[in-house]
Structures are given as structure tokens and as C-alpha cells.
Amino acid sequence: MSKKVIFFILIFFCTNALSNENYFLMLKNSKVNVRMGPGLDYPVKFIYKKKYLPVKVIDKKENFRKVIDHKKNSGWIHISQLKKVNSVIVLSNRILFKKPTFNSKPIANLENGRLLILKKCKKNWCEVRSQNYSGWINMDNVWGKD
């Protein structure tokens, strides 16, 4: 085989692998229908009532995305109800710090399942806000960020 043919085969497979990758989005509204299948004709399976909830896209068909949440619930959501993710959920009890280091002053205890809005990130730390608190959290063991 020539080098050109091998190059094009590699590009084809790499591009397909990247397009099939799972990624995170978040809910745009405080009430979002999750359907049994990818269409408005499919029955509603359940309703999310948490604006900004991060979900992982695991499949897509036309204007619908099949998503899974941090509790392993899955279903189909119309793309108009989703937007780029800027939130995470902590998967275990965590401490919110004043600065991006474990030696910094602790601000609050965050319980498992707490929704956090991301402000900015540096390496493995992100500045977040949650209700009355704002500070830094180490991004190990969170749902919503790759």
C-alpha cells in the first residue's frame, strides 16, 4: 500500500473514533422531558426538574440526544433543551477551599450530589459556586467534566 492510502485510512478511522466519543451537556431549563426514543411521538419516560444538571451524551439521532445522568438514568432529550456544560456534580462528600490547594482555608463541606456551577479551571482545580458559597474544588470524582 502506498503512504497516501495508509494516511487516508488512518484519518478516516481517527475521525470516526472522535465523532463517536461521549461528551457532556447540561439541561437548559428547569423542566425537561426525557423520552423513551428519539422523537416527540415517543412517550415521556421521566422529567428532569433540575436546571444546569450535567448529562453525558451517549448517542444521537437527528435532533435528539440519548443521555445518561450520574445516577445511570437514561433517555432521549431534544437538543433544544440542552446546552454546553459549565456545571458538575460531586460524587462524594468534598471540601470547598478558598484557593486551589488542599492547604488552603476550607470554606464549606459539599455533600454527594451537590450541583456546582463552574467559573474557571486551572489544572485539576476549578473555581465554582453553589448557592451561597464560592471557592475552589479539586476535580477528582465529579460528574460533568472530562
Image (cartoon, helix red, strand yellow):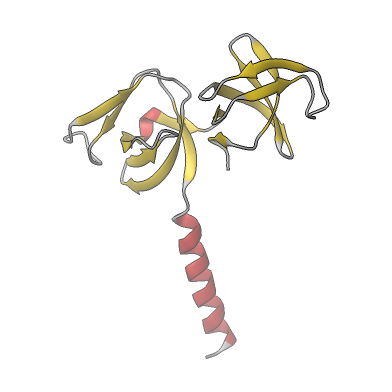
Horizontal relation, residue 7 to residue 29: left or right? right
Nearest to the observer: residue 63 or residue 18: 18
Q: Quadrant of residue 128?
A: top right
**Percent position of residue 28, x then y:** 43, 24
Residue 113 in the image: x percent, y percent? 50, 24
- Figure label count: 0
Which residue is found at the position 59% from the left and 25% from the top? 93
User: What residue lies at 32% left-to-right and 40% top-to-bottom?
Assistant: 63
Q: Can you say whether 132 is above or below 59 in the image?
A: above
The answer to which of 94 and 26 lies nearer the viewer is 94
Residue ID at (63%, 8%): 132
Farthest residue toward the front?
A: 93
Place residue 94 in its image quadrant. Answer: top right
Q: In the depicted view, which residue is nearer to us: 75 or 95?
A: 95
Residue 137 place in picture, x, y as percent: 69, 27
Quarter of the picture holding the C terminus: top right
Residue at screen point 58% across, 11% down? 131
- View extreme (right): residue: 103
The residue furthest top is 132
- Closest to the observer: 124 or 20? 124
In this rendering, the answer to whether 36 lies above or below 137 is below
